[in-house]
Image (spheres, rainbow, N blue to C red):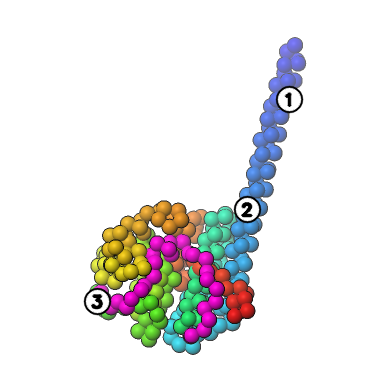
Amino acid sequence: MNGLLLILIIVVVAALALAVYSSSKASGKRTAASLADAKADARRVIERLGGQVLNLSGSDEASKQAMADASERYTAASSQIDQATTDKQALLAKESALEGLYYVRAARIAMGMDPGPELETLAGQRAAGAVSEDRRVQFEGREIEASPAPSQRTPNYYPGGRVAGRPVPAGWYSEPWWKPALVAGAWGLGSVLLFDAMFSGMHGTGYEQGFAQGFDEGQDPGSDGGGDAGGDSGGFDGGDSAGGWGDFGGGDFGGGDFGGF
């Protein structure tokens, strides 16, 4: 009797072990397949951005700067996808490439060309909105301008999104004043005054009803589709968008020719 009980126990334990092993193996296969799909999706966008970077050159200051930013995003996205080991990291690489395509689109607009098809919305972009009027403010001894269109005075494009937790509207600026926050991951003490003066009450931005509301939206992880995809993940710095400063960003223009444009 004791011998039969021992055999039964061994059989049950073996069956449980086999079930756990089979489940773990199946889960590993699903994870690997999901990562492969995510990386393939990201590489598709990265390759399309690469085609644009190789085939389009700027003709004025605004378009040249936008293409330089697009090239920087391509380099960042290529590096990020090579290092990606999770779906999240692959998504961040795609975001970086998508942002680069927004810069390409901006360059085409600056040169009076067809901008191509609409792009996927970047993380945080909807909540940030877009510059809808010309603004000029004094900040820390210098004059900073914002405009909905490129000009000699506003040659620096930003596709819109959150930078260090705060919405920065899409638009053209006299200088890339958001770069220090991208690098440091935090805004300087005087930034509240800059945001308040530059965007408060501006129609079409996250600050349309005033700076406080826009700031609150930037802090709310659920304000734009469940949070900003540019969080820190597995060694990838996902501050937000804009040029290749260790984060991720936007869109899809199809190969090297905007799908026939």
| Residue labelled with disc 1 | 11
Which is closer to the viewer, label 3 or label 1?
A: 3
| Residue labelled with disc 3 | 138
- Residue type pointed to by label 1: Val
- Residue type pointed to by label 2: Ser
| Residue labelled with disc 2 | 34
Mark 1 and mark 2: Cα distance apart in space: 34 Å
Residue 184 occupies quadrant: bottom left
Mark 3 and mark 1: Cα distance apart in space: 79 Å
Q: Main SS type for the magenta part?
A: loop
- Whole-percent x, y for residue 127 in the image: 40, 62
- Whole-percent x, y for residue 244 in the image: 47, 70
Residue furthest out toward the front = 203
Mark 3 and mark 2: Cα distance apart in space: 49 Å
**Vertical placement of residue 124 versus 222, above or below:** below
| Mark number displayed over residue 80 | none
Please state the extent of the stretch shown in magenta in the rendering.
Answer: 111-139
